[in-house]
Amino acid sequence: MKPYLSLLALAGAVAISSGCSASEAPFQVSLQTVQDVPVIQLESVTDKVVLTGFTVNRGNCTRTKVGGIYPLPLTFKFGDGVKLFAYLCKVKEVALTTDQGTFTYSFR
């Protein structure tokens, strides 16, 4: 049982939203570091969701950019994804604003 809990801790994100459970969150979110830059990977787990905005560390990490040349809003189908690059930040939390509500993911 302990290895399973360790994997959950490493996997990272817990979704919190008013009126919605983590199983209803439209994105699966993970965090990794690539060349000392935190990278937040978003993957859609719903048939259609529109990402209209995001905030990292409650607005205290303003140097976060969407990977590629994608302007917001972005529409995702199931399985689609995008990366957010959080320059000069230690990511603890990301809030994703979507057409389905705002979902907050915390990293331990």
Image: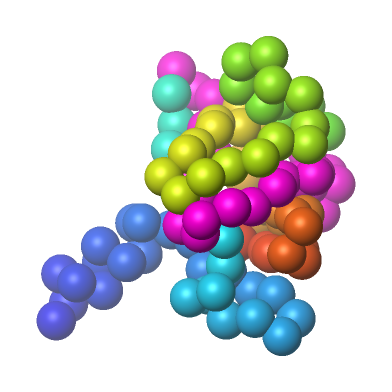
Q: Residue at x 61, y 32 (%)?
A: 84
Image quadrant assignment for residue 40: top right
Residues 74 and 29: in front is 74
Q: Which SS does the magenta portion mostly show?
A: strand
In magenta stretch: residue 62: no
77 relative position to 72: left or right: left
Q: Position of residue 99 (x, y in %)?
A: 77, 57
Farthest residue to the bottom: give it: 19
Q: State the residue at coordinates (36%, 64%).
A: 9
Is 53 contained in the magenta span?
yes
Quadrant of the image containing the N terminus: bottom left
Q: Is residue 38 something one can see in this rendering?
A: no
Q: Is residue 104 left or right of residue 26?
A: right
Q: Residue at x 46, y 57 (%)?
A: 45
Task: Give the x, y percent position of residue 67.
Answer: 60, 21
Give the total number of marks visible in the rendering. Answer: 0
* Left or right: where 67 falls relative to 52: left
Tell me: 79 left or right of 6.
Answer: right
97 up-or-down from 15: above or below: above
Instruction: In the rendered view, tell whether residue 44 sits above or below residue 101.
Output: above
Could one spot residue 22 in this view of the protein? yes
* Residue 96 rendering spot, x and y as whole percentages: 71, 53
Q: Is residue 77 above or below residue 9?
A: above
User: 51 or 106, which lies in front?
Assistant: 51
Pick whichever, 7 or 88, lies toward us: 7
Furthest residue in direction top, as rendered: 69
Q: Which residues are magenta?
A: 35-61
Image quadrant in which you'd find residue 83: top right
